[in-house]
Amino acid sequence: MYKKWSYILLAVAAFLSIDNPVRAQESAEASASLRKNSLPGFDYRVEKLRSFLSNHNSPLANYAEDFVENADAYGLDYRLVPSISGVESTFGKRIPSSSYNAYGWANGNYSFKSWPDSIKIVSGTLRTKYIDKGAPTIAKIARRYAPPSNTWGGKVEYFIGKIDVLPLGFDII
């Protein structure tokens, strides 16, 4: 029973911080005991993200750990960059050939060296060129990342919410 309430509280905390990647990360750090199992190296965020991306037949599924590690390194919500990939390329399925550009970077005209390279560059740039320069919310990131779209931010928030939904009966031992 305690675990189910923990998941519910975690989901509520994540929902309340959806429009603020910085606050969402602070909330995530505060609930580290809910994220990690007692097994060394286990982080349920990686497994949840991998499962979510696999359910979408994403080529990014095998890089869930890269998303989480880079989010932690740059102080981002771990769901932000994968959610951007959902909006921009259906989670990496619709990209220019061999570009590893699942994020619409440079209007899709930029090629990264690999998936891990793309995740690191996009995560770092979101931190240094967006959040640290006055765009700490998804709404403010959207104005710079995808102008003149009025729907981009809402779509990113939609995927963030979908990643965070735990299936019924999901239990971490």
Image (cartoon, rainbow, N blue to C red):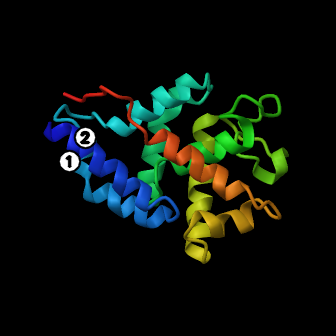
**Residue 44 drawn above or below residue 129:** above
Q: Position of residue 101 (x, y in %)?
A: 73, 40
Q: What's the residue at 66%, 58% (across, down)?
A: 153
Q: Does the image show residue 129? A: no
Q: Residue 22, which numbered label?
A: none
- Tell me if label 2 and label 1 are in contact, CB under 8 Å: yes
**Residue 35 drawn above or below residue 16:** above
Say what secondary structure mark 1 lies in. helix
Q: Position of residue 9 (x, y in %)?
A: 28, 51
Q: Amino acid at mark 2?
A: Lys
Q: Amino acid at mark 1?
A: Ser
Q: What's the residue at 41%, 53% (across, down)?
A: 72
* Residue under numbered circle 2: 36
Is the C terminus in the top left, top right, bottom left or bottom right quadrant? top left
Query: Which residue in the rendered view is the most extreme toward the bottom?
Result: 134
Q: What's the residue at 25%, 50% (across, down)?
A: 32
Give the left or right position of residue 105, taking residue 45 as reference: right
Give the left or right position of residue 104, taking residue 65 as reference: right
How far apart marks 2 and 1 lie (CA) works out to 6 Å
Is the N terminus in the top left, top right, bottom left or bottom right quadrant? top left
Say what secondary structure mark 2 lies in. loop
Q: Position of residue 120 (x, y in %)?
A: 57, 48
* Residue under numbered circle 1: 33
